[in-house]
Image (cartoon, rainbow, N blue to C red):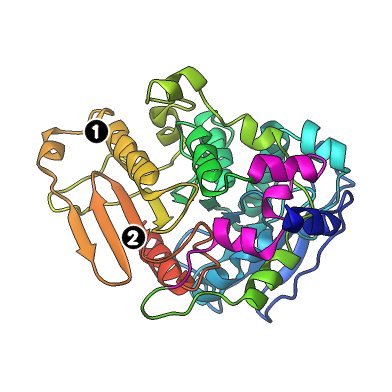
């Protein structure tokens, strides 16, 4: 409780634009939505030295994130792929929103509008629709967009992401990980950022703690990561992705239809050949030590996407597909039924920022080049 009282003074009720330093090959640009043309959204852009043969990528951050959380992945992919990373309203260097409006009045529809603006900008700039790489709660936004046919994509990557069946399980996991969370929020006057108000809390929820080859992030590195987080976040965003409570109580929660999500992916998601070949349009990736979207939850996502593909009328060869399993000390990769499932060993919820980020980035590159 003493820690809770001391961290109260680190919480802020106003937000400011945060201009994270950028590498030389990445440019900060700004776009706006049709409804709010005067309010600018940060869009990071990194162009490869030569014309890319793959579609561009749009990176979408999760709650309390920002475009710059993707800089490690961008550094790995930029030599061959055009990369974009968006900061939604009140995140990163995008325009700020008051505490009450952001926390209680900013909805999934509002954040979807920000993402649609970025997709539209990329399409008119490049003539191509981007691959969507979505982390955490952005996974829910990306699937919402595809499910409701608000945009389409040539490929979908769900990284430590909210499942199509809703995120109630993730919040149950959070409560198990941090049983003092509720009391701490009371001490913090119900501030929405209370669960991540100290370096130790950020480390416990977001990072995995290292592995046999890499040391865990230092406190200074976690503190630097925390410094660029927005001061508060929308609560309507995750609440609108809870899904069916009674379905969750019965052990089969529901929110979005897999078939509807798959319907928003361009190209034939049904192409399969024996031995796991063909084009995979969906990749589900998770950190082994993710305490929110755990491996079991993400495996269910992959399995249900495979079942969705199977139900779309593929020929009988699908029943014979055994898939390909790769396993080593760094990762597990399962290619089966048109979906790639990847576990990054030792990584936590922020696989793109944990010490294993390069392993995750390389697996993402391998997925992209086969599209």
Give the CA distance from mark 2 to mark 1.
Answer: 20 Å
Residue name at image x 12 percent, y 49 percent: 274
For marks 2 and 1, give the one nearer the viewer.
Answer: 1
Residue name at image x 76 percent, y 63 percent: 29
Foreground residue among 340 and 137: 137
> Relative to 86, is 298 on the left or the right?
left
Image quarter where the C terminus lies is bottom left
- Which contiguous range is marked in magenta? 181-210
Residue 178 at x, y percent in the picture: 57, 48
Callout 2 crowding tier (Cα within 10 Å): few <14, some 14–19, many ≥20 = few
Residue 123 at x, y percent in the picture: 61, 50
Membership of 321 in magenta stretch? no
Q: Quadrant of residue 218?
A: bottom right
Residue 38 at x, y percent in the picture: 90, 47
Quickly name the residue at label 2. Answer: 370
Residue name at image x 51 percent, y 21 percent: 245
Q: Secondary structure at mark 1?
A: helix
Q: Quadrant of residue 175?
A: top right
Foreground residue among 100 and 50: 100
Residue extending furthest left?
A: 320
Q: Which badge, 2 or 1, comes first in the chain's sequence?
A: 1
Q: Secondary structure at mark 2?
A: loop
Quickly name the residue at label 1. Answer: 310
State the predominant SS element of the stretch in magenta: helix
Callout 1 crowding tier (Cα within 10 Å): few <14, some 14–19, many ≥20 = some
Residue name at image x 63 percent, y 58 percent: 201
Question: As displayed, is residue 235 above or below residue 333?
Answer: above
Foreground residue among 213 and 141: 213
> Relative to 57, is 249 on the left or the right?
left
């Amino acid at each position: 409780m003493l820690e809770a009282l001391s961290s109260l003074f680190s919480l802020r009720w106003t937000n400011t634009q945060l201009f994270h330093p950028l590498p030389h090959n990445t440019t900060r640009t700004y776009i706006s939505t049709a409804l709010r043309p005067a309010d600018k959204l940060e869009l990071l852009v990194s162009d490869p030295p030569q014309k890319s043969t793959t579609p561009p990528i749009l990176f979408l951050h999760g709650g309390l994130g920002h475009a710059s959380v993707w800089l490690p992945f961008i550094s790995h992919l930029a030599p061959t792929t055009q990369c974009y990373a968006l900061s939604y309203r009140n995140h990163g260097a995008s325009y700020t929103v008051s505490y009450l409006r952001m926390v209680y009045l900013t909805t999934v529809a509002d954040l979807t509008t920000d993402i649609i603006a970025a997709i539209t900008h990329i399409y008119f700039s490049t003539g191509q629709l981007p691959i969507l790489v979505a982390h955490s709660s952005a996974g829910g936004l990306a699937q919402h967009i595809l499910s409701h046919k608000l945009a389409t994509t040539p490929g979908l990557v769900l990284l430590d992401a909210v499942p199509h069946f809703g995120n109630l399980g993730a919040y149950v996991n959070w409560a198990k990980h941090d049983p003092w969370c509720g009391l701490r929020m009371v001490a913090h006057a119900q501030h929405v950022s209370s669960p991540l108000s100290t370096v130790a809390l950020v480390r416990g929820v977001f990072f995995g703690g290292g592995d046999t080859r890499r040391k865990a992030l230092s406190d200074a590195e976690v503190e630097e990561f925390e410094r660029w987080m927005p001061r508060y976040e929308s609560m309507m965003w995750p609440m609108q992705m809870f899904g069916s409570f009674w379905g969750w109580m019965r052990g089969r929660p529901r929110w979005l239809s897999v078939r509807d999500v798959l319907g928003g992916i361009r190209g034939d998601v049904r192409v399969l050949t024996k031995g796991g070949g063909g084009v995979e349009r969906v990749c589900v990736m998770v950190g082994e030590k993710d305490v929110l979207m755990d491996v079991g939850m993400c495996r269910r996502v992959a399995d249900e996407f495979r079942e969705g593909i199977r139900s779309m009328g593929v020929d009988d060869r699908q029943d014979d597909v055994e898939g390909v399993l790769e396993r080593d000390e760094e990762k597990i990769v399962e290619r089966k039924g048109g979906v790639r499932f990847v576990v990054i060993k030792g990584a936590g919820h922020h696989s793109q920022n944990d010490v294993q980020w390069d392993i995750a980035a390389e697996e993402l590159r391998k997925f992209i080049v086969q599209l």
